[in-house]
Structures are given as C-alpha cells and as structure tokens.
Image: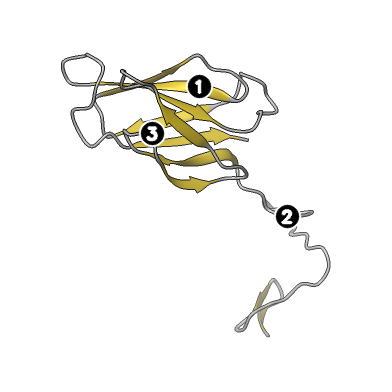
C-alpha cells in the first residue's frame, strides 16, 4: 500500500476486509451484495430452462399444442406487479396471465401467428 497523494491510497495486492465495509461516496454496502434479479435465465422453444441466474431458480413447461411456455418461480414480494424484461430471437414475444409465481410466454412468427421462425430462445429477467 502506498499513498499517491493526501486523497489517494493505492493497493497493489488483494484486500481482505473481515468486518463491515462502508465506502463514503456513491457506493455503500452494509451486508451482502444481492443479485438485482428475482429470477433470470434462458429458455428454449421446447420449454427447457438452459440457464438460471438470480436469487431463485425458474422452471418452465411447454403448453401442449401451442407455442406458449408457462414460466414458474417462487412468489414475488411485489405479487403480480413485478417488473419483467423479455428478449427473444423471435419476431414478436409477449407474456400474459401474470401471477405472483408465474406467467405465460408467447412467441409469434413473422406472419404474426403462434410459432417460431427462428431458434426460439428467450431471455427472461424479473427484477427484485
């Protein structure tokens, strides 16, 4: 550790803090840094969860006879009013039937009918 000036200290090795850490400025941390996502991950057109991220895991089931996928997760603290972001390789993607523990994901092809025109991959993020 060395001082570049009165206002700056340079650490050239790892730093271990064994008690709480508080940074004066724009960043504070009084405990664990949690993921900002309740759930997040990728699902394919068959309803298989490829990747799970976030605080909780999600699961999904393909709706028989439809291109829709039901997505499930633990009850969200905001009930059915959580913030969800969905991205897809498909032309149109939307969700319906939102509850505190699930929603139904729909994909529409370029002809605006149910189905997949591309690879049917979906990225889903639900904020904490």
**Disc 3 crowd, CA 10 A, few/some/many (<14, 14-19, 20+):** many
Q: Mark 1 points at which residue?
A: 103
Q: Where is residue 59 in the image (x, y as percent from the top left)?
A: 51, 36
Q: Position of residue 25 (x, y in %)?
A: 70, 54
Q: Which mark is residue 29?
A: none
Secondary structure of the residue carrying tag 1 is strand
Q: In this view, does 99 lie to the left or right of 95?
A: right
Residue visible at 33% across and 34% down in the picture: 46
Q: In this view, does 71 lie to the left or right of 91?
A: right
Choose mark 1 or mark 3, whichever is in front: 3
The N terminus lies in quadrant: bottom right
Q: Earlier in the sequence, mark 1 or mark 2?
A: 2
Image height of 86 relative to 28, above or below:
above
When asked about the image quadrant of residue 86, the answer is: top left
CA gap, disc 2 and disc 3: 33 Å
Q: Residue 32 carries which label?
A: 2
In the picture as drawn, the residue positioned furthest to the left comes out as: 111
Q: Position of residue 48 (x, y in %)?
A: 39, 39
Image height of 64 relative to 44, above or below:
above
CB within 8 Å, label 1 to label 2: no
Q: Is residue 12 left or right of residue 42?
A: right
Choose mark 1 or mark 2, whichever is in front: 1
In this view, the residue in front, 12 or 65, is 65
Q: Which mark is residue 47?
A: 3
Q: Is residue 39 left or right of residue 111?
A: right
CA gap, disc 1 and disc 3: 13 Å
**Disc 2 crowd, CA 10 A, few/some/many (<14, 14-19, 20+):** few
């Amino acid at each position: 550790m060395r001082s570049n000036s009165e206002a700056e200290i340079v650490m050239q090795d790892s730093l271990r803090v064994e008690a709480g850490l508080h940074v004066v400025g724009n960043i504070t941390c009084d405990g664990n840094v949690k993921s900002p996502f309740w759930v997040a991950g990728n699902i394919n057109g068959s309803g298989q969860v490829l990747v799970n991220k976030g605080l909780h895991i999600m699961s999904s089931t393909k709706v028989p006879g439809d291109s829709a996928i039901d997505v499930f997760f633990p009850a969200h603290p905001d009930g059915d009013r959580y913030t969800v972001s969905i991205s897809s390789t498909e032309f149109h993607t939307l969700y319906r039937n939102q509850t505190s523990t699930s929603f139904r994901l729909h994909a529409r092809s370029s002809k605006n009918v149910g189905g997949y025109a591309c690879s049917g991959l979906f990225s889903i993020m639900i904020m904490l």
